Image (tube, grey):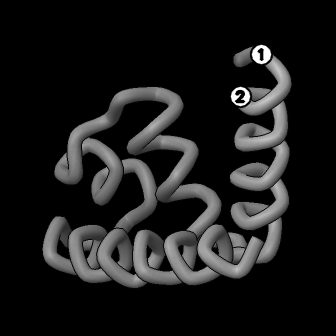
């Protein structure tokens, strides 16, 4: 229902706010602007491999944060 969706959005937003700046930028580009890993890497001056590794760490962190709720 709508209340649950709003709660989930808030929980995700709060978890993302805990990420270091670089990881927040990766989330923004990858999941809110639909950039590919290559596009994200180019925009941030990283390699695609670095973006991929950071993305795995981000997802693990977010899973942990959200499972605590």
Image point (52%, 53%), residue name: 27
Q: Is residue 66 above or below residue 26?
A: below
In depth, the one of 60 and 17 nearer the eye is: 60
The answer to whether 15 appears left or right of 24 in the picture is right
Give the structural element (helix, strand or loop) at label 1.
Answer: helix
Judging by the rendered image, the residue that carries numbered circle 2 is 5
Q: Position of residue 58 (x, y in %)?
A: 47, 74
Image point (17%, 66%), residue name: 48
In depth, the one of 1 and 5 nearer the eye is: 1
Q: How many marks?
A: 2
Judging by the rendered image, the residue that carries numbered circle 1 is 2
Q: Is residue 56 above or below residue 36?
A: below
Quadrant in the picture for the C terminus: bottom right
The answer to whether 65 appears left or right of 17 in the picture is left
Quarter location, residue 67: bottom right
Image point (35%, 70%), residue name: 55
The answer to whether 20 appears left or right of 17 in the picture is left
Residue 42 visible to the viewer: yes
For mark 1, does the 10 Å Cα neighbourhood hold few (<14), some (14 to 19), or many (20 or more) residues? Answer: few
Q: Position of residue 14 (x, y in %)?
A: 84, 60
Furthest toward the top, the residue is 2
Quarter location, residue 30: top left
Furthest toward the front, the residue is 1
1 and 2 marks in contact (CB < 8 Å): yes
Q: Is residue 9 above or below residue 12?
A: above
Q: Position of residue 57 (x, y in %)?
A: 40, 83
């Amino acid at each position: 229902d709508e209340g649950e969706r709003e709660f989930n959005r808030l929980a995700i937003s709060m978890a993302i706010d805990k990420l270091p700046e670089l990881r927040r930028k990766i989330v923004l580009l990858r999941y809110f602007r639909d950039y590919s890993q290559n596009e994200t890497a180019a925009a941030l001056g990283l390699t695609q491999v670095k973006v991929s590794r950071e993305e795995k760490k981000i997802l693990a962190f977010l899973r942990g944060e959200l499972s605590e709720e």
